[in-house]
Image (tube, helix red, strand yellow):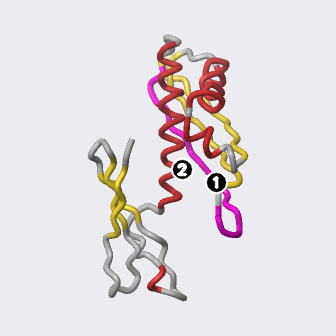
Amino acid sequence: MQCTVTWTGNAGTKSNMGFVAETGSGHLIAMDGAPDAAKPENGGQNLAARPMELLLAGLGGCSSYDVVLILKRGRHAVQACSVAIEAERADTDPKVFTKINMHFTIKGKNIPKEAIERAIAMSHDKYCSASLMLGKTAEISTSFEALEVV
């Protein structure tokens, strides 16, 4: 797996901390820093996601992929899956994630709550690489709601 990240600004530009990542699979992802009123040269222009937000997005994607796949393999009629993620970071550098809560919303027909609980646990404890890595610095909690589709 590989990725190349390129700064899109130039040294003479104030408030330009934008970057573009090109993934090994050929996809582009824009990133930018938050504006910094005290030191504009150190801030971004708020034109794209922050790099740390992308870590949370990766966690959500990785875990949701697992949950949907596990439910499908269990022959459950899952029709939708989303996860809302909230995180806290350390106050001092390095400002690692210290707490992460993942709240899944699963829509489907007659999916037992135990099956959803098991799929989330299996992802968190065994399959989701992002969850297992971030769990080294952050306490990760999960919750879910199941919505019945008629």
Find residue 43 and report its horizontal and vertical position in percent: 47, 78
* Vertical position of residue 38 compared to residue 81: above or below: below
Instruction: Give the extent of the magenta segment.
Output: 78-95
Residue type at tag 2:
Leu
Find residue 2 and report its horizontal and vertical position in percent: 37, 46
State the residue at coordinates (65%, 65%): 94
Does the stretch in magenta take in 86? Answer: yes
Q: Quadrant of the N terminus?
A: top left
Q: Nearer the viewer, residue 136 or 115?
A: 136
Instruction: Pick out the residue farthest to the left.
Output: 26
Left or right of 19? Residue 92 is: right
State the residue at coordinates (48%, 53%): 54
- Residue assigned mark 2: 56
Q: Is the residue marked by circle 1 packed among few (<14), some (14-19), or many (20+) residues within 10 Å?
A: some
Tell me which numbered mark, 2 or 1, is placed earlier along the sequence: 2
Instruction: Pick out the residue farthest to the front.
Output: 2
State the residue at coordinates (67%, 60%): 89
* Vertical position of residue 9 compared to residue 108: above or below: below
Measured Cα–Cα span from mark 2 to mark 1: 8 Å
* Vertical position of residue 51 compared to residue 144: above or below: below
Judged by its main secondary structure, the magenta piece is strand
Residue type at tag 1:
Ala
Badge 1 element: strand
Residue 13: quadrant of the picture: bottom left
Badge 2 element: helix
- Residue assigned mark 1: 87
Q: How many discs appear? A: 2
Left or right of 8? Residue 49 is: right
Residue 10: quadrant of the picture: bottom left
Find residue 125 and report its horizontal and vertical position in percent: 66, 30
Does the stretch in magenta take in 106? Answer: no
Q: Are marks 2 and 1 in contact (CB under 8 Å)?
A: yes
